[in-house]
Image: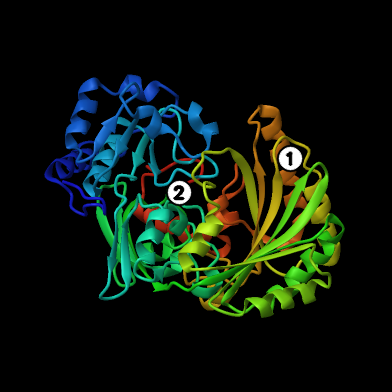
Amino acid sequence: MGNSLGDHRLNRRALLATGAALFGSGAAAKIISTPGVADAAVPTSAWKHLAGELDGKLLRPGDDGFARAASTFDPRRDGKRPVAIVRAASAGDVAAAFAFCRSHGVHPRPRSGGHSYVGASTGNGVLVIDVRPMHGVHYHAEDHKVTVGAGAVLGDLHQTLDRHGRTVPTGTCPTVGAAGLTLGGGIGTESRLYGLTADALTGGTLVSPSGHIHRFGRHTDADLFWGLRGGGGGNFGVVTSLTYATSPALPGTIFRLSWGHHDNHRVLMGWQERLAHLPRHSWANLHLDTAGGVVSPSITGVCWDRGASREIKAMVDAIGREPLSRRTYAESHAGAMGWFAGGANGRTRQSWYAGSDVVGHAITSARTKDIIAAVRKWNGSGAAAAIFDPLGGAVSDLGAADTAFRWRHANATVQWYVGLSSTSRANVGRATDWVAGCHHAIGRSSVGGYLNYLEPGRKLSDYSGDNYDRLLSLNTKYDPHGILNSRYSLPG
């Protein structure tokens, strides 16, 4: 049987299924993409056979629990109709699902937390490989490492680690899958102190589309280890477990500073200036929130363990204007992570549209004004914001080619984000146009995009820069037939 960390063995049934699919036809079957065709083309006996292969559960439309299992975090994707969902409880289940897809020409779609910005973990006529049943978190006290099943979410990871006074640098949304975050890099409030989530990764297991289980790390399948640290989910195979090095969990003093709309330019320029001197135990992001044609700037930051008063003063001095409001909160590590998680925020399903840029160097004064003007143009339903997150610190300890995450020496990422209170075609169209306008405004200050903030229509090479060709070669090695072939996966 499987376990919540992901059983690494191939059970005998899965091994036989893998062998039959690999050697019976000599090539991968043609993938079916027309909605509904896959269901009609696969005989009932094949579905029954797959169900018997699994340690977990196969769900088909009409089964109890199917609708819930089919949903992602964004209700906009609820109209998608997967042909089935494999609730994978082991690596053997993933291998069996891949064998089924190869034999019957069905698209596989891996899913961890279900937070993909583009709905990449669902679709019409696809087989969702849902790893959420493998959600165990096991802390190893002897070497301060933690192993998680690929279905573990950030809230569960931090809840376990806080009991031991340890942490892994992650984002702040508690329902995001640890696996998906890691594979795209993983930025958050501890990135400057401890690096990306991917930088804490020491190894794990992956099932390739051929059904082979790879135990990757610095000395085994090292090329795969390189690609999985920032090369993105939905490539190479399906990760079933991950092991991270942990770091001391420090208390934090959170601060929030807000200014009036007349100070937008001053705040953005001053924040950039301070960013160049920010100590690595400090993190501070900048919001330009807009509603009704008014843009309001604010800075939210945290100083881990020490130095909050000095940092707040230095930030205000760089901006050259006293904030209209200033709030601080001294928290334990668990309290700080809970504060950034925002209570119920991240647990309630919501719809959004977003894009991103990576800020390669300081934005000029003129371009800053262009950005503020572009942000102000939002006129749709729902709130919009430009969210600048700092890089630097421990993120820049590695070189641009040391992992698949290319942007080691960039200044920041910026997310162009719209919370969609209406998901009408017209409002989504306005959000699309607004994000495009923000891209245009930042212009050459952008060197690329952040892979965990995928957006429709953008070239995949924009997310990995000079590392893209190496990722293509790696994907050809581990998925030569292009079984993982969504529009957001690397081409095989």
The secondary element bearing badge 1 is classed as helix
Q: Amino acid at mark 2?
A: Thr
- Residue placed most toward the observer, 360 or 427: 427
Q: Is residue 389 above or below residue 320?
A: above
| Image side of residue 373 versus residue 464, left or right | right
Q: Quadrant of residue 124?
A: top left
Q: Amino acid at mark 1?
A: Asp
| Mark 1 burial class by Cα count in 10 Å: few <14, some 14-19, many 20+ | some
Q: Position of residue 245 (x, y in %)?
A: 36, 71
Q: CA distance from mark 2 to mark 1?
A: 29 Å
Q: Quadrant of residue 114?
A: top left
Disc 2 vs disc 1: which is toward the camera?
2
Q: Quadrant of residue 54?
A: top left
Q: Residue furthest left?
A: 12
Closer to the chain start, of discs 2 and 1, is 2
Q: Name the residue rendered at 20%, 47% in the picture.
A: 2
Numbered circle sitting on residue 175: 2
Residue 399: tell me if it is visible: no
Numbered circle sitting on residue 348: none
| Image side of residue 227 versus residue 328, left or right | left
Q: Name the residue rendered at 43%, 61% in the picture.
A: 227
| Image side of residue 197 versus residue 210, left or right | right
Numbered circle sitting on residue 433: 1
Q: Position of residue 444 (x, y in %)?
A: 74, 61
| Image side of residue 180 versus residue 11, left or right | right
